[in-house]
Image (cartoon, grey):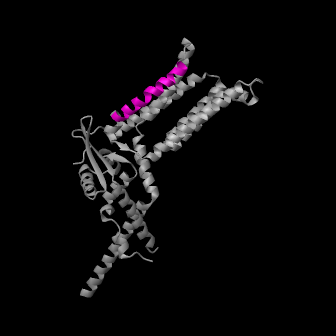
Amino acid sequence: MSPSDADIQNIDRLIHEPSRLTIMMHLYVVESADFQFLQHQTGMTPGNLSSHLRKLEDAGYVEVTKEFLDKTPHTALKLTRKGREAFKEYRRNVKRFIDKLPE
Amino acid sequence: MVMELLMIANYFAIQSFICYKVVCIFWLKIMTKQNTLREIEKKAYMSYHQDGLLDIFIGLYALAFGLGIIADKILEFGFGVIMPAILIAIVLPIWIEAKRKITMPRIGFVKFGARGSNKLFALLLGLTVAGLGVFTLFGFFMMGQNGRPWWIEILFQYGMIWIGLGAAVIGSLFAYTMGLKRLYGYGLLTLGLFASGHFLSIPFEYFLLTIGSVIIACGAVLLAQFIRRYPLPKGAPENVAQ
């Protein structure tokens, strides 16, 4: 059985982009992290990370909270419930797609 | 001629598509493995505990315990009991403050899920219950009217080795639970030193001082490496989404 068009269509293109997938993966394994930690872990530049985060925030996958800690601006990031569900669904769909590929 | 060119173009298009698919499948296979997520979680966790602060505080604890016993002998006052109690009360707030001042400005802040802390709490609870059980059992047999049983005599005779073994087991349990391999090393070091202490007849507290100093030195090296690897960001704070 080979994958159908529907299998490919089911894959969330917003998450599928490698940089955003990396961000989603790193946020999925923690409860929350700040911008600096995520930047160290992903190895992305601040501008690149910021632009991808905005897209994920617009989709409602990431919650961005800006606050001050000891008079220093601080950006806390966490996956929303919708984001967690979307990532789980993405993994299921990709796995299904791969399983259907001929050897 | 046109047909031939079209065929060549088609051939290259198919080859490129196959290459693209192979790369995509390889990437997707990596991303869908549960192991990869575990490794990412481990990497995040390890980077947060490679600052050596934990080691420095474990070492300080052993050092203070040893100094407490020495002071106890010299001044004949219960420092050996008081020192660990004082340290327990002050070490945790200092450790949190050190994390906030040294680690967080360099690599940022992360909050891990409840799974890891639940495992650690279960281990601490288990060790406390086991410790209390052992002490109760010991007390029961020590105060028996028929004198000490033979196995307690053996425990006392090889006391240093048993303490070393206990430290190695506890160190290994923490190493396994926290995923910090160097704790296995500290456990083995304690076992080795205490076992040699048994044969060399050197007092217990000097080994505590040695172990504490070695662990502090390891922690200081890790801290220096951490500070070199993650310097403080210059100029505008990086911790802000633009």
Q: Position of residue B83 (x, y in %)?
A: 50, 22
Query: Which residues are drawn in magenta?
Result: B79-100
Q: Taking the image as drawn, is residue B46 in sight?
A: yes
Toward which corner of the image does residue A58 lie, by quadrant? bottom left
- Per the image, is B90 magenta? yes
| Residue B106, placed above or below residue B146 | below
| Residue B177, placed above or below residue B131 | below
| Residue B65, placed above or below residue B183 | above
Q: Position of residue B6 (x, y in %)?
A: 27, 83
In this picture, residue B34 sits left or right of residue B236:
right
- Per the image, is A57 magenta? no
Q: Quadrant of the N terminus of chain B?
A: bottom left
Q: Residue furthest right?
A: B146
Give the residue displayed 55% in from the left and 26% down from the top: B208
Give the residue displayed 71% in from the left and 24% down from the top: B143
**Magenta span: chief secondary structure:** helix
Q: Position of residue B112 (x, y in %)?
A: 40, 45
Give the residue displayed 42% in from the left and 45% down from the top: B45
The residue closer to the viewer here, B222 or B165, is B165
Toward which corner of the image does residue B220 lie, by quadrant? top left
Q: Position of residue B149 (x, y in %)?
A: 75, 28
The residue closer to the viewer here, B123 or B27, is B123
In this picture, residue B195 sits left or right of residue B216:
right
| Residue B78, placed above or below residue B110 | above
Q: Taking the image as drawn, is residue B188 in sight?
A: no
